[in-house]
Amino acid sequence: MSGKTIERGRISARVPVQVQKTLELAASMVGATTNQFMVQSSLREAERIIEQERVIRLSAQDTETFIQALENPPPPNAELKAALQHYREARRDDEDTGFNWHPRPKGL
C-alpha cells in the first residue's frame, strides 16, 4: 500500500426537500449513496458541457466553406491592416523596456 493520499475538496449544496428526496431515490435505484450519485451525475454533465463547448461541429457544407476560407483567405481589409500596424508598433515599444503598454485607440 502506498502512503500517497489523494487531496480532496468539498462541495455542499442546500436544496429543497423534494429535490433531496428525488436524488436519494435515484441514488438508491442505482445502488449508490446520494453523495456518490451526485458526484457521478455532476461529473458526467460537466464533462458533457466541456466537450460541447470545446468542440465545433460543422455540417459538410460548413466544413467545406471553412476550409475554402482557410485555403483562399480574402485580402486584408483596413481594420486588419490597422490592427497589424498597432501590433508592430507595440512590439517595437516592448523591445526597449520590460513593459510599455498603450491602450488601443478607440474605434479599432
Image (cartoon, rainbow, N blue to C red):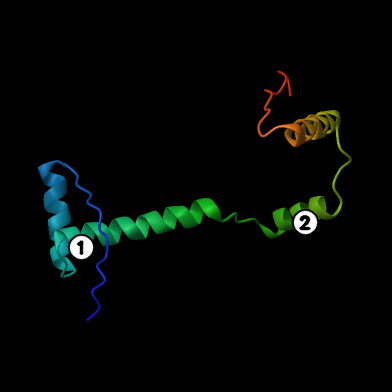
Residue found at x 23% / y 49%: 11
Q: Residue at x 86, y 37 (%)?
A: 76
x%, y% of residue 33? 14, 63
The kind of secondary structure element at disc 1 is helix
Mark 2 vs mark 1: in front: 1
Number of residues whose C-alpha sits closer than 10 Å to that of mark 1, classed few (under 14), some (14–19) or many (20 or more): few
Extreme residue in the right direction? 75
Residue 22 or 95: which is nearer the viewer?
Answer: 95
Left/right of residue 12 with respect to residue 49 in the rendered view: left
Q: Is residue 40 left or right of residue 22?
A: right
Amino acid beneath label 1: Gln
In primary-sequence order, the first of circles 2 and 1 is 1
Mark number for residue 36? 1
Quadrant location of the N terminus? Answer: bottom left
- C-alpha distance separating marks 2 and 1: 45 Å
**Above or below 13: residue 103:** above
Element carrying mark 2 = helix
In which quadrant will I find the C terminus? top right
Residue under label 2, please give it.
67
